[in-house]
Amino acid sequence: MILLAAASWVVATAGEPLAGVEIGGFAQVEYLQRQISQDELSDGTREPLNEDGFGIRHARLRVGRDWDTVGFFSVTEFSGRDHVVRPIGLDIHAQVPGRDGAPSPLRGTVGLFPVPFGFESYGETSDDRFFGERAHFTYAFVPGRFDLGAALSGHLWAIDWIVAVQNGEPLDSGPYAYVDPNKGKDVAARVTLSGALAGGLEAAAGTSVITGRGFSAGTGPTKDSFEWQDLNEDGRVLLSELVPLPASAGRPSDSFDRWGLGGDLHVSGELPTLGTLRVYGEVAVGVNLDRAVAPADPVLLGRDQRSLGWLVALTQDLTRHATVGVRYDQYDPNRDALELYDGITVVTRRRFQTVTAGVAANHWMTEDAWARFLVEYAHEKNSLGRDARGRPAPIDNDTLRLRVQVAR
């Protein structure tokens, strides 16, 4: 909140040039307990395997300004999982003004903005979402939410639509954030229909599609070399224990096709005395679209990687001062995975299954500034694990989350 106060002071004292600039943002500090935490370091990266402790999940500053026909909006991440300062949103837009304050019927946007695929990814921000984290398949398909590109969007009657052309490398998808390693661009589109139903209910239905070209990094050429294998384990190098490794020309980089299709449905209504009840669900399928959980690379795999994810959720306000919610999500990152069982190759179904339940207390300082304290427990089954003998085995990774958030 110190960042928000400083930015607000700058705007207040800068006079006419900054008049109308909107300042906002949020900060989240949390305590986690994860079942898989260990007091050890990773063999490969030497990073700590312990995740029990306090941390800053997000600290973001939002600055924006809209005139009648043009505007800008920026989001800066000051701290997070990677402890870095980076721009995660920066768009410049031109628009046709809507009548009497209505949304613009046509807007053009360039810059760094959310990928329009899926509700949890595109329709919810990290401070508005009740649950502590997005579902596995949402994060797998669009890790980091934001990507560089250009878009056309608009509002007509009860329909909101957007079509975007972006690099195809969302911010958390790997080493190529803010750049694009291949010429192929992702094209994503989303259409949402919303309106009132009978009995005071509100509903919204959305569909999303994305297609593009993924990148499979090649390998560099190598020289002739050798390795030593201590076959008799005597610690001495023998000529018979030297294994030649011939030079290799390497493998050139390649690109591959990927696409995804998703749909979501939301129904909400007011319950007497209590508040708003929300019920919603989402489903998405992808081919070679996973970019974070089980990254797809059909060039190395030798075939397409088909993925399927879905969720159902319910939240209930208990007046404006508290909210409870429960969500079930499931993600199958590779529906055609093959395993060898008793000498027979079979297709396996190894997936993530998570039940998340939480309760939050809300405190409103003003109409647009509020604080939340979230207590959440997630029961996760990950069937992609292995036991000590290398056989497939489930991994339970239950998580207790205590989070404090202040937002404006």
Image (cartoon, rainbow, N blue to C red):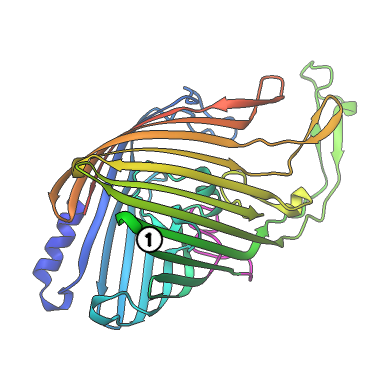
Q: Quadrant of the C terminus?
A: bottom left
Q: Is residue 362 visible?
A: no
Q: Is residue 351 left or right of residue 206?
A: right
Q: Is residue 389 left or right of residue 185?
A: right
Q: Is residue 273 left or right of residue 109?
A: left
Instruction: Please name the residue shown 69% across and 36% down the image.
Output: 349
Vertical position of residue 146 compared to residue 395: above or below: below
Q: Position of residue 304 (x, y in %)?
A: 73, 53
Question: Which is more toward the observer, 162 or 151?
Answer: 162
Q: Is residue 386 visible?
A: yes
Question: Which is more toward the observer, 357 or 89?
Answer: 357
Q: Position of residue 109 (x, y in %)?
A: 41, 75
At label 1, the amino acid type is Pro
| Dominant SS type (magenta) | loop
Please give the range of residues in magenta: 165-184
Q: Secondary structure at mark 1?
A: strand
Residue 1 in the magenta stretch? The answer is no
Total marks shown come to 1
Residue bearing the label numbered 1: 87
Q: Is residue 339 left or right of residue 382?
A: right
Residue 178 in the magenta stretch? The answer is yes
